[in-house]
Image: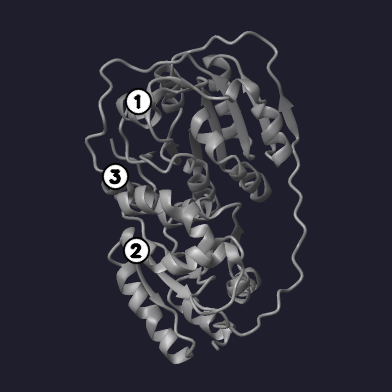
Amino acid sequence: MIDTKVFGEELKQSGFSFYTGVPCSFLKNLINYAINDCEYVGATNEGDALAIASGAYLAGKHPVVLMQNSGLANAVSPLVSLNYTFQIPVLGFVSLRGEPGIPDEPQHELMGQITTRLLDLMEVRWAYLSSNLTEATQQIEQANQVIQQNHPFFFVVKKGTFQEEILRTQEVKISSNLLKQQKNASDQLPKRYDALSTIQSLTDSNTVQLATTGKTGRELYEVEDISNNFYMVGSMGCINSIGLGLALSKEDKDIIVIDGDGALLMRMGALATNGYYSPPNMLHILLDNNAHDSTGGQKTVSDNLDFVEITAACGYTKSIYVHNLDQLRSSIIDWKREKSLTFLHLKIAPGSKKDLARPHIKPYEVKDRLRLFLNSGTSSQ
């Protein structure tokens, strides 16, 4: 068995001190170490954890993701369409529940058989983590070499690999909503392009804008392409978790997350995580057209939900319904003046800009220039 604390300190020496994930009994001792001695963000599911880690990576950190292999299925979408596409490397630890020949719960049987094959199919490089500390330490260096080439690397962890690490008493953290403004007038239903133009007009050299997948990112690119914009492709629903990881890791930057109703509905559990950690430098804007616009305009169920009420209940400091572009503008200005985790809900018209092009810059180039912007603090047109 590995001395968990010594192994964790070896990871820390290699730059890995930001952790996020979902608990597993096989990994509990490493998770306990991360909570005790490092920065740890608990996610509601494994895909969100990968997105949080990716945001931390954009900020310059070397993130670690922890998950049970049953949750690897939740992580498939970001692994193949976020981490692969944008060339965002993370260090992962995935448990091997259901290892063939070792008794386990029935729900782990199939995943135990296919865990490593699934990693191979996703072109994720991996190795079984050695239970010998000297060998495991050497494996960290091998993993780091892969990560430095912009590829994720996962350790597959068998039962009994880590020695006991006692979890210290955890601080109780309560995030409270201080301002909730519900709809109180008719919606003007501006076009998405006009809403994005309003948001873009207020950006500055201290602001990062993250646009969700589909028409939102493509239209923001056409409004103005700058180095502090991030245009998501794939990984539907992950943009606000990327924002969380980035906001927690770059407290000196203003992080604006531009979401869509279809994407937000897909991973609503992330709202609770955002509210709990409550970074004041994060503004979450929902442009809601009650449609999956990129796939033909099929209806979402957003009309049946009160997002202001939901985000307030999740611990967002401010949850505000905005009815028009003037209110959108003034709310963004207010947030820039008095920072707190804020959610803005704006209903927009369905449809998108005619002859909408796709970004001519490749996803990994978007990632590279954003990381450069975050390090240098300057914006380039």
- Tell me: residue 269, above or below residue 2: above
Q: Nearer the viewer, mark 2 or mark 1?
A: 2
Q: Position of residue 137 (x, y in %)?
A: 43, 85
Name the residue carrying label 3: 363
Q: Is residue 327 left or right of residue 156?
A: right
Q: Which quadrant of the view contains residue 91?
A: bottom left
**Mark sitting on residue 124:** 2
Q: Which secondary structure, mark 2?
A: loop
Mark 3 residue element? helix
N-terminal of the two: label 3 or label 2?
2
Which residue is outermost to the left? 360
Which mark sits nearer the N-terminus, 3 or 1? 1
Q: Amino acid at mark 2?
A: Val
Secondary structure category for the residue under label 1: helix
Q: Earlier in the sequence, mark 2 or mark 1?
A: 2
Q: Position of residue 287 (x, y in %)?
A: 51, 25
Is the residue marked by circle 1 packed among few (<14), some (14-19), or many (20+) residues within 10 Å? many
